[in-house]
Amino acid sequence: MKKFLFVFFFSVFAFTLKAWNFEYVKLSEDDGIGIIISETSELSDEIYVGLDYEKDSTGIVNYYIRIKFKEDKVMVSPGRKLLIKLKDGSIITLSSTKFEDKTTHGMYAFRWVGWKDNYVTTTLLDLSVIYPISKSDLDKILSIGAVKARIDTDVMFFSWGNGKDDRFSWLLNKEFDAIQKVINRKPEDLYNGF
């Protein structure tokens, strides 16, 4: 019985940790300025997708769709297109953004840092493509649903979706909800019911 309770508790604890899918979060407690980088989720055999949030010092909020490829050698130069077809037949076109890091060929680089045997270690760069998206376009994807998409890389097109499935918008919805929970937290909630 004790073993069962331990396994049950650990499962609930692990599920609770997994519910917060973020690679990086840094927000000011006072004004919410900062960024949230969501953990990418598998969209297809070749592609992972995530949603990122940023609020700058002027209060402007930006969202970014982040695409990561399983094949590390895939490169996407700044200005390449991401086409997203919605259930109503409309198409949203996004362009990859430019980053100044020349070693990543314009792609966003996130360096993992972790603990190993009581010292900090770093691993290889995790290259992703970032597509700024307006809140109105993001709302369309979340409310209508996306059934198909295509990415223009430097060498070829990557596509996913069969015209019916909306896994893309389902994953973005999940990330959007998690981001909203973080940015809507109130500092005084820490003391409620304690």
Image (cartoon, rainbow, N blue to C red):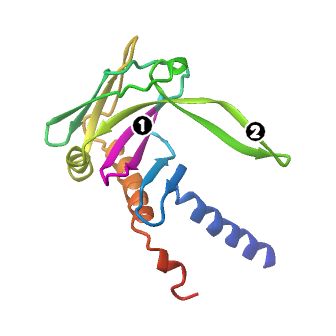
Mark 2 or mark 1, earlier in chain: 1
| Residue carrying label 2 | 121
- 13 above or below 128? below
Q: Is residue 82 magenta?
A: no
Mark 1: secondary structure: strand
Viewer-nearest residue: 165 or 37: 37
Could you say whether the residue bearing mark 2 is in a helix, strand or loop? strand
The foreground one among 85 and 75 is 75
Query: Which three-letter amino acid code belongs to the residue tagged 2?
Result: Thr
Q: Position of residue 188 (x, y in %)?
A: 48, 80
Quarter holding residue 5: bottom right
Mark 2, other Cα within 10 Å: few <14 / some 14–19 / many ≥20: few
The image quadrant that residue 76 belongs to is top left
Q: Which residue is mark 1?
A: 66
Residue 102 in the image: state x and y as whole percent.
Answer: 50, 18
Q: Which residues are magenta?
A: 47-67
Residue 106: percent from left, percent from top? 44, 21
Q: Quadrant of the C terminus?
A: bottom right
